[in-house]
Amino acid sequence: MPDPGLVLILNCGSSSLKFAALDPTNGEEHLSGQADALESSVATLKWRYRGENNLLQLSPNDDFRSVIEGLVERMDGPWSTLKTQLLAIGHRVVHGGEHFANSVLIDQQVLTAIRSCCELAPLHNPAALQGIQAALLAFPQLPQVAVFDTAFHQDMPDYAYLYALPYKLYREHHIRRYGMHGSSHRYIAERSAELLGKPSSEINVISAHLGNGASIAAIKGGHSVDTSMGLTPLEGLVMGSRCGDLDPGLLLHLGEALDYSFTKLEQLLNRESGLLGLSELSNDCRELEEAMENGHSGARLALEVFSYRLAKYIAAYTIPLHRVNALVFTGGIGENSTWVRQKTTNWLSALGYQLSQEQNESTRFGIEGRISKASTPEILVIPTREDWVIARDAAQLASGAR
Ligand code: AMP
């Protein structure tokens, strides 16, 4: 059998680096791992290779570059079979601005464009650039591909992506809605089409990606026509510790009446709000469900606000789609929380949505399938595979580059 080849995926966050080696033809994971709390005294590196889990303490001096160099060293030693199979490196990049509607092979022009988007994603894009630079040095012989979270949403029409602000802010400063989680929503669109037995160009899907970060997309014939995240990942749904939609006047009030600084506002909106802020307990849905069962009223309130906001978005997104072939739940919460799925669907009964309690209970923990009652609008659960989307794009672009 010919060697299928593997793609090494690098996902650099503000202080973490996730990596995986995947077979792009079937999504099989040959290596996965994560470096956390980089450049701190508690930095660690975890990985799983050939069914074995490993953990290593890192030095506070370790950064993206040294972690990637460490991966290369292992590939020259214990992981040498893996190295010979690598056919490309795929980089997850959060913000591609209006430059990228698709994944691309990385060259100097692409690097310049990613750099120009740093002000739109100040925590994420600089980290991705560092990861790319380190990988270019470490794997100079391999094609490197950038896959953007924003790319899938570049098809949105102007009436969906514009804020009702002076148009000049868009024209001169690119202030508009971009949307994120593009690789996940794209996977959901493609996989739903397979499950429904139709080409994706013929189906309309509402994709609810509910994880610690959460967003929803209206996807028409395989194209995103609206999505809930905006210029930044703060807009839209309630998230683990992010607030989602707010009255912008509230920010003026906090600044003027309560003297909040920009730093304090950033902390409040990104890290102290959402499920965590409302529950005064945790940003973690599973923990909140347990607490709710034990009578914690804050946990219940947080999950109620989360589900109500989500239901309102789902109802709104039937408007651009006209006809909805499936509502899909994905992400850690969407794939597992029977409570959130039930509560959200209850709000949507006016649109005909009804859950099969039995299917809702049995479709979790990585299981894919239909959870709606027979003869009611289709509701699916699909475990998302952003990593596989990145691997497929990287392999495809790399094969064109050879
Ligand atoms: P993600 O960011 O996609 O990894 O999703 C993380 C979220 O999924 C957290 O809020 C978890 O509590 C939630 N989650 C994972 N497993 C479960 C579960 N069994 N029940 C409820 N929520 C879960």
Image: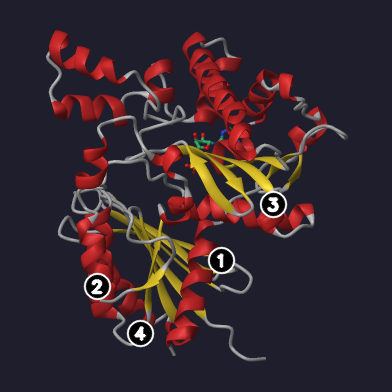
For badge 1, the amino acid type reads Gly
Distance Cα–Cα, label 2 vs label 1: 40 Å
For badge 2, the amino acid type reads Gln
Check disc 2 and report the residue beneath it: 109
Toward which corner of the image does residue 402 lie, by quadrant? bottom left
Earlier sequence position, callout 3 versus callout 1: 1
Earlier sequence position, callout 3 versus callout 4: 4
Q: Nearer the viewer, residue 382 or 283?
A: 382
Q: x, y (%) of residue 61?
A: 15, 59
Is residue 337 rendered to the left or right of residue 193? Answer: left
Circle 4 — which element?
Answer: helix
For badge 4, the amino acid type reads Asp
Circle 3 — which element?
Answer: helix
Earlier sequence position, callout 2 versus callout 1: 1
Q: Nearer the viewer, residue 316 or 172?
A: 172
Q: Which mark is residue 51?
A: 1
Asked if residue 49 can be seen in this view, the reply is no
Extreme residue toward the front, this view: 167
> Could you classify mark 3 by the number of other residues whose Cα lies within 10 Å: few (under 14), some (14-19), or many (20 or more)?
many
CB at mark 4 closer than 8 A to ligand 1?
no
Check disc 4 and report the residue beneath it: 76
> Could you classify mark 4 by the number of other residues whose Cα lies within 10 Å: few (under 14), some (14-19), or many (20 or more)?
some
> Could you classify mark 1 by the number of other residues whose Cα lies within 10 Å: few (under 14), some (14-19), or many (20 or more)?
few
Q: Which residue is at a point 76% across and 57% down the rendered structure image?
A: 198
Nearer the observer: mark 3 or 1; the answer is 3
